[in-house]
Image (cartoon, helix red, strand yellow):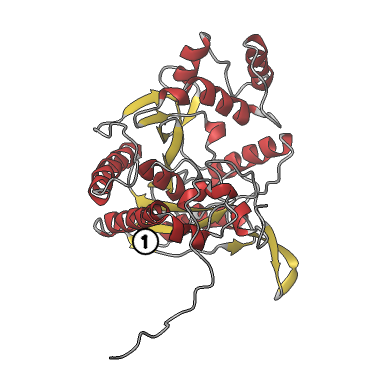
Amino acid sequence: MELPKLLSPCLHDVPVHDASHETSPYPRHVQFLADPVTKDIIRARSAIVQYLRQFFLDRSFMEVNTPIVGSVAGGAIARPFYTNATEFPERELSLRIAPELWLKRLVVGGFDKVFEIGPSFRNEGLDKTHNPEFTTCEFYHAYANLEDLMTTTEKLLSEMASHIRDFNKEGTLNPTSVNFTTPFRRIDFLTGIEEGISRKLPDLTSPDALSQVYQIFHDLSLPLPENANLPRLLDELCSIYVEPQCIDPTFIINPPECLSPLSKSFVHPITKQIVAARGELFIEGKEVVNTYEEENSPFEQRRKFEDQLRFSRAADEPGEIDESYLEALEWGLPATGGWGCGIDRLVMLFTGAKRIGDVLPFGNLRAVTRRPGTSE
């Protein structure tokens, strides 16, 4: 009889499960050994990513990879990570905060339906739903409008909810119990705020709009957000009076132009404010999807970039105009619909995880930079 052979030495006892993953002294690979649920969450993440990929491939989208390191971190309003390359150390480079502008260049080049699943980076805070490194899925579809985009979102998420129910047959996960019956509810951004504060907002293009919105905060005894500018104040009002209403899937539509510089704009038929052709999907009070009709005029886009830069400087934030993207628009971007989804938050929603670190294979930035043998 052949004696058993040692295939691999293990020098430690597997620890008793400790639910406090964020403060556990054990590295993530040991947590997986100790607690099967942590593995089920990562398996669910893989299933969700594969479902997203197949959803777009089945609809003739082409998957692409765009640059992560570049000279300008465009595509969103956020603080980037900076770095440099040994090849040209005199240049300041940055990690992308979104792949959006690269993907739209591909649409300019004749690729009408593209998507990308990959990492982005924002040099901002850590909390239960934010990590400086995160994963997104974005797609761009030439000749799609906002209605098309919202319909696609409804189909994707309602079918994904059913897919996760099948995946979770053993019941180890605790996915959201919200109702994904379509069509999803819609709330208008500005009228939703006005109903909440019981007054009309000022003309947001007027020179004294900022001071008038400041007055609203004062009258309602609301604390001002840090480095308050007009977009940040309006976003804060929405977070107080509109977002908490969005438990079941709800689109918040038509935000003011200053909150969405990359989207097309129009005059709102009721408020007469200039608003963006944009919808943000909220579930359980948190943003899950952002989608809008893309601004394709190089002249309008330059104006909006300049407005964005002015707002950023007023809030003491970095910013610059992406001239190479404006040059790309000069070659003609078709009418295009764009869509973005944070995969980490999506996994949290469909697994019941309470912290973003629980849906990342090796946890959040604090966990991956922790010194060995410590809980700090």
- State the image coordinates of residue 5 (x, y, percent, origin top left): 39, 85
Residue 211 x %, y %: 69, 18
Q: Left of 250 or right of it: where is 31? A: right
Residue at image location 31% in from the left, 34% down from the top? 177
Tell which of 184 and 271 is nearer to you. Answer: 184
Q: Is residue 85 above or below residue 129?
A: below
Q: Position of residue 145 (x, y in %)?
A: 34, 41
Q: Circle 1 sits in a helix, a strand or a loop, which is it?
A: loop
Residue for point 38% across, 27% down: 247
User: Is 54 displayed left or right of 65 in the figure?
Assistant: left
Query: Going by the image, does 187 lie left or right of 236?
Result: left
- Read off the residue under disc 1: 111
Q: Residues within 10 Å of mark 1 (few under 14, many from 20)?
A: some
Give the residue at x 35% y 32%: 249
Image quarter where the N terminus lies is bottom left
Amino acid on which the number 1 mark rests in the picture: Phe
Question: Which residue is located at x 45 percent, y 49 percent?
Answer: 344
* Residue that protrudes farthest toward the right in the picture: 90
Instruction: State the residue in front, 321 or 64.
Output: 64
